[in-house]
Amino acid sequence: MRLQDHRGFFLWFFPAALFFGCFPLSYAAGGEKFFRGESCAVCHARIRDRQAPSVAGRTLEDPISVKEPYDVVVVGGGFSGLSAAYFLKDRKVLVLEKEDRPGGHGRAESWRGIPYPTGTVYFNSEPYEAWKTLFEDLHLKPHKVPSPVNLLMVNGQLVEDFLGEGASRLPYDPQTRAGFLRLWKFLRQAYEEDRFSFSFRAGDLESQRLEEETFWDHLVREYGGMVASHYDRFLQDMLGAGIREISAFAGFLMLNSEEDFYTWEDGTYTAVRALAKSLSERLKTGAWVTRVWQDGSGVNILYEQDGKNLQVRSRTAVLAIPAHVILSILQGMPREKEKALAQVRYSAYVVTMLGFREPVWTKSYMLWANDAIFTSLVFTDFPKYGTSKRRGPQVALAYMPMGSEAARRRLLQTGDAELKTALLRDLEKVIPGSSQKVEEVRIMRWGHAEPIPYPGYLSRVRPRVAQPWGRIFFAGEATQIPAMEGAILSGHRASQEARRFLEANR
Ligand SMILES: Cc1cc2nc3c(=O)[nH]c(=O)nc-3n(C[C@H](O)[C@H](O)[C@H](O)COP(=O)(O)OP(=O)(O)OC[C@H]3O[C@@H](n4cnc5c(N)ncnc54)[C@H](O)[C@@H]3O)c2cc1C
């Protein structure tokens, strides 16, 4: 998603930093009750702090072994895990997902009968390779978002195509505007030449150079500070963390993917449902995996479900869960693997559902603001109605990227009431009169939102995170790129690795 100018950045960043920095610590202890998105209490207790499994204070009994052995057990039912299992459907496969619904960051909820995404909201290119196969098999046909997709509110004016040629209408001096256009031309050319692809090409010196410096340093040097600040906002929205934290290669890769926009009303949950349906009883929800270990002939997976401690055995396993969870549950891994997993850093994100009793915005799918606590507002009814008139309630999602480590701590300490006050204040600035029409505010927190592709991550860390270990294969966005397509492609890759192993070790 998108951007801003220097002044906007400071206007946004400092109030936000003060705002989050000031919250009373008392929220930390009772923080869990505020959580939507991914509930962290059980995860922190069971996985991070390794507390003994218990239900209502009662320690769980010794595990009951599930007799049936599997070819592949997939841990995690987000896009990566569901896709891995989908491509192994002809095998004896089982997916274990801790939440009561699959989808991970691709889940949706609903308000007054209107579905809305809680994380993943759209994707930017026509499906290709394994992703295409999957969508075709499942008859998945997303809507292409009509124009205008993005509008930026700047100094009370709306600017369209503000990352492209529209940048010439932004309120900057001629030199800065020229910098924007130069960058835009470079991006167009790079896109034509397919210079930035998901698979980092180690031999390419130019890519290597871009991978070693931050995107911030690169943009400031080549295009000027205003251009860098503008794109910082945009990439914060996309990744949860800004361009001072990511490599220039990763920055170009993410920008390169911004072409057309595709979505469903529920974001991408339609695809999750179709995947889950195709797996039917092979997917178990409410199943917390607490320990994974392998021996000479198979993999053991310990999990909790319905107050029971269960153990299942499989010939192979695909771990499609975040790196910090793997570190806590996978036993006996080589030092090198542990080191790589520990090097994955995550951003934190708040997404807020704003339920309006009547439509407040019909001019674009996304509305960007450079001096608000949110980077963008997404109007989920736009793909269906476009700019035409509509009646009845409307849903908007406010995307609020928080940054990395320090932000995660603030997220734990911050109460819903404070977030809501700040959001409504800024909403009113961006769409005057809209805050009075808000009927409901739902705040969703993602403590480990997206892996941050910092300098050296894609070239040196990611390959080691993805590297199979014996009978265990690794999927998930940290092994590819932080996007739905990255998760799907990583699931496909891990499924192929597991398949090859099974075929070679009958
Ligand atoms: C706020 C936000 C907005 C985003 N917007 C977009 C977007 O618009 N477009 C886009 O392409 N991408 C977007 N992304 C990125 C996209 O959502 C992810 O890349 C993708 O969903 C990751 O899928 P995954 O399977 O790798 O991980 P996850 O979605 O994190 O799935 C991991 C699953 O594992 C489960 N799990 C974890 N631990 C255990 C355990 N111990 N036992 C059992 N199960 C476990 C979790 O509950 C979860 O369901 C966004 C992400 C966020 C956070």
Image (cartoon, rainbow, N blue to C red):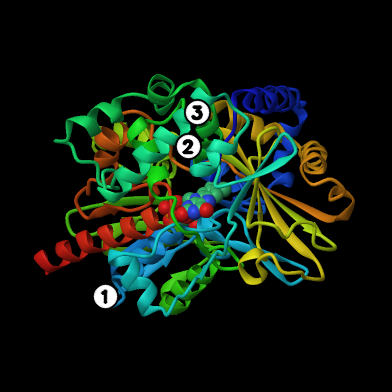
Badge 2 amino acid: Tyr
Does residue 65 appear anywhere in the picture? no
Q: Answer few, some or many: residues within 10 Å of disc 3's Cα (few below 14, many 20 plus, some between 14 and 19).
A: many
Left or right placement of residue 91 versus residue 402 in this view: left
Task: Please report whichever mark, 2 or 1, sits nearer to the chain's N-terminal start.
Answer: 1
Q: Secondary structure at mark 1?
A: loop
Badge 3 amino acid: Val
Residue identified by numbered label 3 = 227
Residue sticking out furthest to the left: 504
Residue 162 locus on image (x, y percent): 55, 42
Quadrant containing the C terminus is bottom left
Q: Answer few, some or many: residues within 10 Å of disc 2's Cα (few below 14, many 20 plus, some between 14 and 19).
A: many
Which residue shows up at 36% across the image and 62% down it?
74
Task: Please report whichever mark, 1 or 3, sits nearer to the chain's N-terminal start.
Answer: 1
Residue 457, placed above or below residue 191: above
Circle on res. 185 = none
Quadrant in the rendering for residue 267: bottom right
Does residue 339 appear anywhere in the picture? yes
Which residue shows up at 33% across the image and 35% down it?
249
In-front residue for pair 368/266: 368
Foreground disc of the pair 2, 3: 3
Residue identified by numbered label 2 = 346
Residue 353, placed above or below residue 89: above
Residue identified by numbered label 1 = 91
In-front residue for pair 189/441: 189
